[in-house]
Amino acid sequence: MYYLIVRNLGAPRCVDRNEEDLYEDGMSFDCTPHLECDPKEFVKEVEIICIEHPDDPIIAMVFRD
Amino acid sequence: MRKFSFLIAGVLLLLTITACTSVKRFKSVEYKGEDSSLVDVELFNARISDEPVTVRDKNLWTLSANAQTRLVQILDERYPDNEQFMSAMAGSFGTGETPLQDLTRKDLRMIFTISKNRDYSLLNDAGGRFSPADRIEYLKLSLKIPESYNLRFHEWNHYITEYGDIDIADVSFSQNLDLSVDGSYGGVDMGSEATLARNEKQVVSKRYLKLNGSISDHQVVIEEEGTREVDLTGNITADVSLLFDGFPEIVMVPVFTAVEDGSLELSALNLVDIEVPAMSEAPDTLYADLSLIYIYRHVASGWNTFAEWDDKVEYYQGSISRRIPLFPKKDYLPRLYCIGTEQGGKDALKFRKTQEKEYLLQFRDRHDASRFLEWLLNPSRLQSNPVFIGSSKLLYKGDPITPMEVIQNQLKVLPVY
């Protein structure tokens, strides 16, 4: 399982998870959920867009279990 | 002929006195170079506050005419006793508190202290650079916020100096603080005509100040120029609004209704979108770069008179730059509360709305969180059944939680950040 994790004010949160690594730069996600995740291995960084702030891309991290 | 000589001499004397006292600014002037040890600046208080929440009482008089009529009928039926009826009519029934939905805007009050280095031991020393008549004639103060904080100045609110204050509702201002003689009985009363919307009475004499200020995204610049006899030593207070970049959050707003036995029953859990500051990390302190450029008017001789026209003036220019703490973490982190434990790492209750939508069960204040926990632990609830709110489940560590497990895990109200 792959997890998309964003970090704000020092607190990480898992906003999406998928069985495949489909995460790429420029993709949009809802950044409000706190999903239960089990991140173990860092995969990559991607620049995503929170749908609530389409003009401010942020850096997110992709992990896998 | 002799009369004419006296008259001409008298006129010349009068002209000389007048010219000396009201026209001349100094006897001689010289620029002596740079000296940054004459003045110091500190930001000694930076107080940050949230935007005020509008709270409006709801009572009989804030209702529409129809609602007033209906309420009076209801109260009349419910309270046949006249005293109780009057008491109920006079009461309020809840508040219309607006949920605080944007936590990215902060009001900041900055107090800059400008001080002179008063070295009285060199008072009569030819090489000394201090006299009692010295003054700071001009200063330019700037405060710069590093761009990495995602924080920017938004607007001025208020600006206060030793000599007066002005209200500002814009990104820049340029004002003269002019004080005019207002001849009142028994003395001289000075009235300020400087402010944008205020008119203050002050008991100072002949003080004139020129003020400029501007705000850009990452910098505040304040310029002050004191004219005759005005020393800029003292405090400057600047109220500004700041804006963080926003990051989306969802908070829970529980709605309770009282049931017949007096206990509270959760009738709804509303999800409200809010904005919190967007910063990947939360540094312990946010710093800013403070710099001051000043012109110091040193009176080398002639300082034994109050008037300035006989002063031998030496000007010095100086500058000071330093990084200063602007405000600590507790002042900018949003005050949100969750229900969880810090044993073995922080874990908190979550709210599963759909299979792929789980949210942290966080509240906008401690009161809401405490009332929700109290409701959760109500003894009338079946202690071994998972907690549902409508069709949504409460989760702890990914699994449904029962009231008994809330007690076993010693869950309590915690700040989210």
Image (cartoon, rainbow, N blue to C red):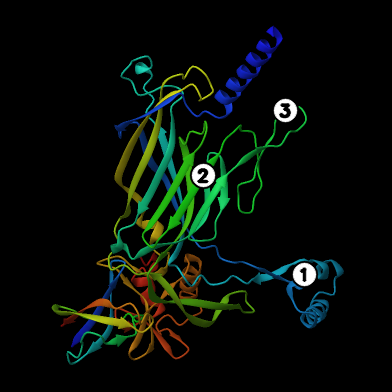
- How far apart in space, not on screen, are marks 3 and 1 (Cα)? 57 Å
- B38 vs B152: above or below: above
N-term mark: 2 or 3: 3
In the picture, measured across the screen, residue B61 lies left or right of residue A65, that is: right
Percent position (x, y) of residue B120?
38, 19
**Pair 2/3: label in front:** 2
Q: For residue B65, what is the image quadrant? A: bottom right
The label shown at residue B187 is 3
Can residue B200 be seen here? yes
Instruction: Indicate the amino acid at tag 1.
Output: Ala
The label shown at residue B260 is none
- Chain of the residue on which disc 2 is drawn: B
Question: Of B26 and B117, which appears nearest the observer?
Answer: B26
Is there CB contact under 8 Å for labels 2 and 3? no
Crowding at label 2, few (<14), some or many (≥20) Cα neighbours within 10 Å? some
In the rendered picture of this protein, how many numbered marks are placed on residues? 3
Can residue B379 be seen here? no
- How far apart in space, not on screen, are marks 2 and 3 (Cα)? 27 Å
Percent position (x, y) of residue B24?
52, 28
Question: Which quadrant is home to the C terminus of chain B?
Answer: bottom left
- Chain of the residue on which disc 1 is drawn: B
The label shown at residue B210 is 2
Q: Residue at x 57, y 25 (%)?
A: B19
Q: For residue B186, what is the image quadrant? A: top right
- How far apart in space, not on screen, are marks 2 and 1 (Cα)? 57 Å
Percent position (x, y) of residue A47?
23, 80
